[in-house]
Image (tube, rainbow, N blue to C red):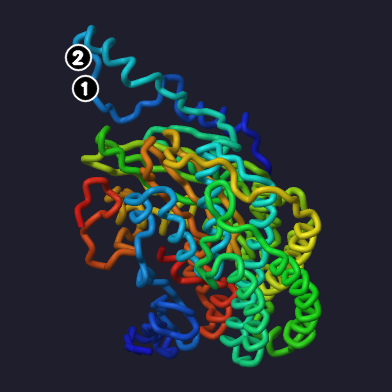
């Protein structure tokens, strides 16, 4: 099966629904902020990038980049699975300034040049996200690694004991506030 | 080996009690080629569960990447998979060049391809000798290390290192190749062809080897996809997935070479893939030497390298499969996040599923056919 960029874009757009993707709010809801302050802070936050976009392989190294809600990662993995992708990696990024954790899912396609990425963000105070290991068995180890390095809990994961760190490790070394 | 016994109640109809025991393989065991531990639950000679336990030589390269400048991470790249250092450096410099839009002169790209393919042959030679050693044949490793030595001498002449090369730089290479290297590489290609023929005649058709590998340890294309297994493992499952052709990088599109695939998906298929790959690497080297352009080997690179904000990935076909670097930059002179996606990590992760129900010696033969390098798994 050889997926096309259009098919994948349509499927992810449908997944996200008509409304803009509901990410974890970084600030209180707009109603709580005075209108003047909200408009003043808008340009600082910059224009949000579209949740589903096509990127240039020569610049990015992948051609498809989607942002989904944390609850949608399993459905997104199922889309990738049906389209014949192989699991490349699951990893995290700690955005400490925004108090958020990003989880990035990389995929390669075994037959065509089609590198795809989708990502999501969770709150840094309760970093929890469903596991995709029932869809991609290989995600088991990647998620275990992401859990021990970032402290992101993958709900429903069969075994979140440390993989690379010592078995009694309770620290998360790739968090930006980690002090050895 | 530590053996502990656990007796389960007898079966309902009076048959022999089902008895399993835990067998610890490693972390110090010759068959694992490094500190890999496998906790197996055995039913007699058969494996009911084999759980790899990794992390014994975890060094946290990803954290090291975050606390040094882009260039200072270059020596680390040769220490992730110490048998395939050129490819790993290639992926890292490739990612930085892609993000910073650094132009690499064509001569440097050609030399990168030549040295990468030499490194691939050297790596496969180690695998070949070590696999046969695992299977009880001592002699082949002496031959393969003799050949590998010639390659290491050539690469040492370029950069001074024998394993941890660190030969590539952002924008090119640290040294140009000299006539000695070019003549030596041509001589090596001439030398290797009859040697590979000899290896085929002496080893590949050997009935003991075939009995140990044929039909043993099937890893299907579907399993490879689900686990992200790449390299000779996925090509041994009949899928022509090779980063050099599917996601072309460097100057690989300039060369005429085949991607060997074998549909049998057993250990022998993976063996054949690597043996054929060495021949294809020789073809690539020959063509690259013929086409090698003149010119500089370093492009224009800013003195203080700062990458634009955003993330960039770059994947290469390392000797063991797909190696990808994902860099996230926040505009400073150090990486904000550096993810190393290593092939052995994914290739080993399927071992638990693939080894279920196998006999222990067969599982070890399959482990050898996966060609694991433990620092590559543990990072």
Q: Nearer the viewer, residue B167 or B85?
A: B167
- Which quadrant of the figure contains the N terminus of chain A? top right
At 48% from the left and 79% from the top, the residue drawn is B33
Q: Quadrant of residue B209?
A: bottom right
Find residue A28 and name its label: 1
Percent across and percent down for residue B203 are 73, 86
Query: Looking at the picture, does residue B197 appear above or below residue B86?
Result: below
- Residue B12 left/right relative to B250: left
B323 vs B198: above or below: above
Give the answer, above or below, for where A51 lies relative to B102.
Answer: above
Identify the element where label 2 is drawn: loop
Whole-percent x and y of residue A15?
48, 30
Q: Is residue A129 visible?
A: yes
Q: Residue B1 occupies which quadrant of the picture?
A: bottom left
Residue drawn where x is 41% and y is 82% of the image: B25
The image position of residue A11, as x and y in percent, is 55, 31
Q: Are marks 1 and 2 on the same chain?
A: yes
Can you say whether B6 is above or below B71 in the image? below
Name the disc covering residue A33, or none.
2
Name the residue nearer the viewer: A95 or B71.
Answer: B71
Left or right of residue B183, residue A121 in this image: left
Q: Are marks 1 and 2 in contact (CB under 8 Å)?
A: yes
Does dot 1 land on a helix, a strand or a loop? loop
Residue at the location (54% across, 73% down)? B162
Q: How many marks?
A: 2
């Amino acid at each position: 099966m050889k997926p096309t960029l259009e098919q994948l874009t349509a499927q992810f757009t449908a997944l996200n629904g008509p409304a803009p993707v509901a990410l974890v709010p970084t600030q209180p809801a707009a109603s709580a902020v005075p209108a003047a302050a909200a408009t003043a802070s808008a340009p600082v936050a910059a224009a949000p990038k579209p949740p589903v976009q096509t990127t240039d392989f020569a610049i990015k190294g992948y051609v498809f980049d989607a942002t989904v809600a944390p609850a949608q990662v399993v459905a997104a993995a199922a889309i990738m699975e049906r389209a014949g992708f192989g699991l490349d990696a699951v990893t995290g990024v700690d955005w400490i300034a925004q108090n958020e954790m990003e989880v990035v899912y990389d995929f390669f396609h075994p037959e065509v040049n089609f590198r795809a990425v989708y990502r999501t963000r969770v709150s840094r105070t309760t970093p929890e996200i469903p596991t995709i290991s029932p869809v991609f068995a290989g995600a088991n180890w990647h998620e275990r690694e992401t859990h021990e390095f970032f402290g992101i809990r993958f709900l429903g994961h069969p075994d979140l004991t440390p993989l690379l760190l010592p078995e009694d490790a309770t620290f998360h070394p790739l968090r930006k506030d980690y002090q050895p | 080996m530590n053996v502990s016994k656990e007796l389960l109640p007898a079966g309902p109809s009076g048959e022999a009690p089902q008895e399993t025991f835990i067998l610890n393989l490693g972390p110090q065991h010759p068959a694992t080629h490094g500190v890999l531990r496998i906790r197996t639950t055995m039913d007699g000679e058969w494996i009911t569960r084999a759980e790899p336990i990794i992390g014994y030589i975890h060094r946290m390269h990803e954290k090291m990447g975050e606390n040094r400048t882009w260039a200072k991470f270059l020596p680390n790249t040769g220490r992730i998979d110490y048998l395939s250092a050129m490819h790993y450096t290639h992926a890292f410099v490739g990612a930085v060049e892609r993000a910073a839009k650094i132009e690499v002169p064509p001569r440097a790209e050609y030399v990168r391809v030549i040295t990468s393919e030499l490194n691939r042959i050297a790596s496969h030679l180690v695998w070949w000798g070590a696999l046969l050693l695992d299977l009880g044949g001592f002699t082949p490793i002496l031959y393969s290390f003799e050949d590998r030595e010639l390659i290491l001498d050539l690469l040492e002449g370029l950069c001074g290192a024998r394993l941890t090369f660190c030969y590539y730089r952002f924008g090119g290479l640290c040294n140009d190749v000299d006539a000695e290297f070019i003549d030596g590489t041509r001589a090596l290609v001439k030398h290797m062809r009859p040697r590979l023929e000899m290896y085929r005649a002496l080893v590949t058709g050997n009935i003991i080897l075939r009995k140990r590998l044929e039909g043993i340890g099937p890893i299907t294309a579907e399993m490879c996809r689900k686990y992200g297994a790449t390299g000779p493992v996925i090509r041994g499952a009949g899928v022509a997935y090779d980063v050099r052709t599917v996601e072309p990088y460097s100057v690989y599109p300039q060369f005429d070479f085949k991607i060997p695939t074998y549909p049998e998906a057993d250990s022998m298929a993976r063996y054949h893939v690597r043996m054929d790959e060495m021949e294809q690497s020789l073809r690539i080297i020959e063509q690259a030497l013929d086409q090698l352009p003149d010119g500089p080997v370093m492009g224009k690179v800013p003195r203080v390298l700062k990458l634009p904000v955003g993330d960039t990935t770059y994947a290469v076909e390392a000797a063991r499969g797909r190696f990808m670097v994902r860099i996230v930059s926040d505009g400073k002179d150090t990486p904000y996040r550096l993810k190393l996606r290593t092939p052995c990590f994914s290739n080993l992760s399927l071992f638990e599923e693939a080894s279920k129900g196998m006999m222990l010696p067969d599982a070890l033969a399959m482990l050898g056919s996966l060609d694991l390098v433990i620092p590559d798994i543990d990072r």
